[in-house]
Image (cartoon, rainbow, N blue to C red):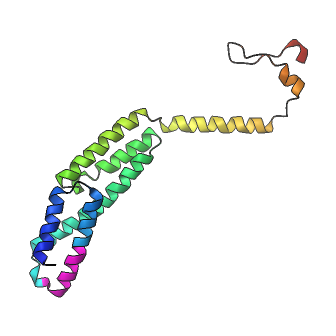
Amino acid sequence: MDLQDTVARLNQGLATMADEVKLQDLILRSLQELRAQYRLSSDRFSPDLIAELQRAAGLAEAIHEFRDAVDDASDARTRDEAMDAAWQLESLRARLWPPVLEKRLDKELRQLAERAASLPEAHTLIRGAVQRRIVMELEGAAPPVRPSVARSLCAASSDGLGQWSETSR
């Protein structure tokens, strides 16, 4: 394909493509074609064109990082993880320069902020995990309860503690 056609197709995609996967694919395919053409006749490439193509290559890398960050955001289980993912997404803002990708970034950040509000904080999950581990260790270390004693336990009192009946003492 001709140099000008490849560059025009790349510029058209940069201006209009909303799907970052397709845009990344277009950039990578176009750069591969242009590198092959550059090897054949480098004199056809101006310094401005080379700088523009380097910027497009940087965009392809930023799109890859963006996709990874979106995956991380969807896997966030705590508010802290969601905030880390939001920071990671926000750090890509300057490198995702086509307006269509900037809008997509804003959308992902909005959705992540809404989701983060309903996620628990990390220390809450850790505390719950520690409590479950302690209960399991205590249950594992406790001697087995005889069936006759277990039947004699009364219902839990209002303070949440079980009471022994007179027959079990």
Q: Is residue 75 above or below residue 37?
A: above
> Is residue 139 positioned above or below 68 on the image?
above
Q: Is residue 144 left or right of residue 45?
A: right
Q: Residue at x 10, y 74 (%)?
A: 4
Residue 98 position (above or below residue 86):
below
35 drawn magenta: yes
Query: Quick check: 101 left or right of 68?
Result: left
Task: Tell me how many marks there are.
Answer: 0
Q: Toward which corner of the image does residue 18 lie, by quadrant?
A: bottom left
Question: In terms of image quadrants, where is residue 56?
Answer: bottom left
State the quadrant of the C terminus. top right
Q: Give left or right: position of 72 versus 97.
A: right
Q: Is residue 122 visible?
A: yes
Q: Residue at x 81, y 34 (%)?
A: 142
From the viewer's side, name the closer residue of 60 and 89: 60
Which region of the structure is painted magenta? 31-42
Question: Quadrant of the image for the N terminus?
Answer: bottom left
What residue appears at the point 79 percent right and 16 percent down from the top-left corner? 154
- Residue 73 image point, x, y percent: 39, 47
Q: Residue furthest bottom?
A: 40
> Is residue 169 among the parts visible in the rendering?
no
Any magenta on residue 93?
no
Name the residue located 39 percent from the left edge and 37 percent from the top edge.
115
Q: Position of residue 112 (x, y in %)?
A: 35, 41
Dividing the picture into quarters, in which one does residue 127 lie? Answer: top right
